[in-house]
Amino acid sequence: MKSVSRALPPSAGRRRAVVAAGPFLVVLLVSAGIWTTVWGRLPDPLATHFRAAGRADGFTSAEGFAAVSLALLLLFGAAVGSFVQLRPDAPEVPWVIALGYALAAVCGYAVCVTLLSNADVADVSAVRVSPWVLALSLPVALLAGALGRLLAGAAPAGPHRPRGAVSRLDLPPAETAGWSRTISSRPLFALGGLLLGAGLLVGLLADWVGGVGLLFGAAVTLPMASVRVTVDRRGLTLSPTLPAARCRFRRITPDRIAEAGSRRIACFAEFGGWGYRIRAGRSGFVLRSGEGMVVRLTNGREFVVTVDDAATAAALLNTYADRARSHQGG
């Protein structure tokens, strides 16, 4: 039976684009209103970074803070909007929109708290922000994300694919073969690029203490945005394609594999997001929803990787697993 995928109608795609852009536009308008109201009452520089106890320990010029705030909103908004425009039918779109709402809310909350805390202050070193006010950013982000997910609507139904049969490749005992594919994630590339750009902007225009955390996030995210999946006599190997990343994410040798198969993977429903995910009794490297390889290990756990042509990779992996068992038995 031919599988059918149901795409969003053009009107629904336009609605989602408007929904995705909405929070960034609202935050820009609200921030502009607050800037206009308090501009003449602000010290220079502003207290823009606070310790956990609420005491200011970082200061930035008013112009620099405005530039960083605007840059972050534009970068995050461009990333979310681009993904929704390029892949309106992707099952991840509702969650990308939810992430956009959370990011917009956090940025807007930080701008508002910073400006209102600095207004009418004679000594900028005396600016204080209650720890409870700082902690409130988390529920604000969660509520905004939940609203975004609700407004985004349901994900389009993907093609129905039955679970692939477990098979082997007809490979003569003396011969070896290899299989390799590259999997990539545009959202992770965009997120890594945003974190890198935001870290550099914050470091150059504000302080490097705040920028280091963003740069660290970029260093973690970018290598995971594109990964080469290889199956050969050594087993299953996952390694980043980024030239600067000299490491392996995972290698599973044939003697540890009980069986491999293929099926459709729903990354958010099964793993809660993209990247290297760990769940009870299973783990996986998922960069999208769709075709994937499921490897059942000899210890009973499962490892999942979303990749095209997963059935061929699973068949070759089963062949090498059979050879490893026959050698052990012999």
Image (cartoon, helix red, strand yellow):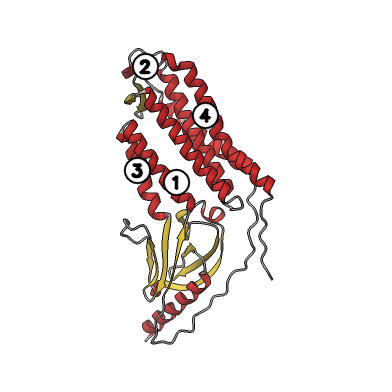
The disc, 3 or 2, on the residue closer to the chain's N-terminal end is 2
Quadrant for the C terminus in the image: bottom left
Q: Which mark is residue 215?
A: 3
Task: Identify whether 15 is placed above or below 43.
Answer: below
**Which residue position holds label 1?**
191
**Which residue position holds label 2?**
43
Q: CA distance from mark 1 to mark 3?
A: 11 Å
Query: Relative to 293, is 123 on the left or the right?
Result: left
Where residue 102 appears, as percent x and y from the top left, is 51, 38
- The three-letter amino acid code for the residue at tag 3 is Leu
Where residue 14 appears, as percent x and y from the top left, is 64, 43
The disc, 2 or 4, on the residue closer to the chain's N-terminal end is 4
Q: CA distance from mark 2 to mark 4?
A: 22 Å
- Residue placed at 30% from the left, 35% from the top? 208
The disc, 1 or 2, on the residue closer to the chain's N-terminal end is 2
**Which residue position holds label 4?**
28
- The three-letter amino acid code for the residue at tag 1 is Leu
Front one among 165 and 174: 174
